[in-house]
Image (cartoon, rainbow, N blue to C red):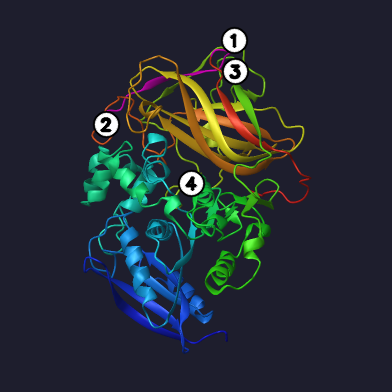
Amino acid sequence: MTEPFDIIMELDVRVPMRDGVTLSSDIYRPDAPGAFPTVLMRTPYSNNIAGMIEKARRLANHGYVCVAQDVRGRWDSDGTYYPFREGPDGYDTQEWIGLQSWSDGTIGMSGASYLGTVQWQSAPFRSEHLKCIAPRVICCDYYDGLIYPGGALQLNVAMTWGMRTNARTGQDIDYHNWNEAFRSLPLGQMDELAGRDLPFWKDWMEHDTYDAYWQAMDDEQRWDEISVPALNMGGWYDLYAPQTFTNFNGLRLNGRTPEARQSKLIVGPWPHSLSASTRTGDVDFGDGSLVDLEALEMRWFDYWQRGIENGIADEPPIRLFIMGANVWHDEYEWPLARTDWQEWYLHSNGSANTLLGDGVLSTDVPLSEPNDQFIFDPAYPVQTLGGNNCCSPDLVPWGPHDQRPAEMRSDVLCYSSMPLEEDLEVTGPIRMILHAATDGPDTDWTVKLVDVSPSGYAMNLCDGIIRGRLREDRCNPVLLEPDQVYRYEIEVGVTGNVFRSGHRIRVEISSSNFPRFDRNHNTGKPAREDTELRQARQTICHSDIYPSHLVLPVIPVADYRGAQSEH
């Protein structure tokens, strides 16, 4: 193979789908005789943007044909756009590529976010030409992983992405005050209030529990129907961080073929944009945090499509960046086999409100202790300060940020450990068992894991939420009995972090994280039509009867000497 190849471009090639709709595809080919492997990228964001053109040319220089396609109903493609229904079109495109004279019959797929969705949804159709995929930052469960995590509407994403990704081209919203826009009610009419008429928005609001609407999307992504391996790429601060691991495990353990079970995973200290900078949010994780994901992906394609023995198949399946120590670890399973699952209990004398309160987090089992209480007023919700957000960090910040402004609110309970006497690595999924009561028919509970440095800087690691009425079954809501204590199991997210000696582990408990999530109105009425806001009196229990605790995946600590994160 001679490199770099000159390039032949064919623009707006019409690729026919099974229903007669044609999709616009730009094709970048090596200017040389013969057939070549193909990399397919399908996008709702225009195949004519600079980043995609640059990548397509780089692939063609390397001896690959790159097909960059606008998905149905977007930009130059025909048809009507409706998100997350991409399987048949992806398969039909793969079958078309396999018949072209410039194709050697092998296809890999590439792309992040929605460009990862199209990979996962087409793979179960099992085109004989598809040999591998390389999805970045995408979920597997569109209800719990994207629109309704824990049963609460992921408002920021639904609005900033959903409202803009509609019609045929990019559609911004003429909002001069997004804070006001996020507060628009009722939710079911939010598209109209933004000057839109979005069938999918109405559907999302109507289907606020897990039902056949969401099941149909999940049915398009069955790991046991996928025959090709996936190179999964994710970030600790990506909104899909937990689901990146779920996708990896799903295919690694359940893939249809031995090849599918050779999937791999890399996760860095990155937000949804992945390895673009050493800095995420407030924190600079150092030059070692940067990875050339394009080079990694090229090795993946070279191995699976060209059969080049470049060593990637022999490397450990998981590579994780461990924050705090700022080092990379190679691993073989998730959760890690050497995990020590530790229970860290909430304690107080009844005044855990704010970071100045008496909340304590320790491994001691509570005995008889007074409850903590606060008033949750949805008219004045706790503001989102970074975290696992998308897709407009200029509107709602993402990544690690100092949480002390939120922790000074009386409606945020803070439980902090004593300064650690030695380093403590926490790598894995985080879970909260919370015993709590409210005085109304419904409410939300939020949990956040925080690393507090000796300076007081409170760095968020991950967070989660649960909607009270969906505490037991996301399919069948059941309202709460006022003032009855319920047990809630809350998925707080995933992390890989070393709490350094002298740092504290902190957990925040509240009832809002806005506008990352919508506000629970505490009325019990359907959120899509409710305009009433009701204050709620919240009670958190921690005692021998109600032992509220955080489950931490503690890893035996290596010798973590060297650079730490800077903020």
Q: Is residue 2 above or below residue 40?
A: below
Q: Quadrant of residue 530?
A: top left
Real-space Cα separation, disc 2 to disc 4, in angstroms: 27 Å
Instruction: Name the kind of residue labelled 4 in the image.
Output: Gln
Of circles 1 and 4, the one toward us is 4
**Pick the front one: 231 or 471:** 231
Magenta segment, which residues? Answer: 531-545
Question: Toward the viewer: 84 or 415?
Answer: 84
Residue 243 is tagged as 4
Give how far across and how far down residue 302 sits, in percent: 56, 72
Estimate the spatial distance between the alpha carbons at disc 4 and disc 3, rounded to whole Å: 34 Å
Q: Is residue 156 left or right of residue 331?
A: left
312 up-or-down from 97: above or below:
above
- Whole-percent x, y for residue 194 in the image: 25, 49
Q: Along the horizontal axis of the image, is 390 left or right of 452?
A: left
* Residue 534, magenta (yes or no): yes
**What's under tag 2, amino acid-wise?**
Pro
Q: Which disc number belongs to residue 526?
A: 2
Q: Residue at x 67, y 56 (%)?
A: 286
Q: Which residue is mark 1?
A: 368
The one nearer the camera, 75 or 136, is 136
Question: Hey, what amino acid is under mark 1?
Answer: Ser
**In terms of sequence position, does the residue under pointer 4 or pointer 3 come before the other?**
4
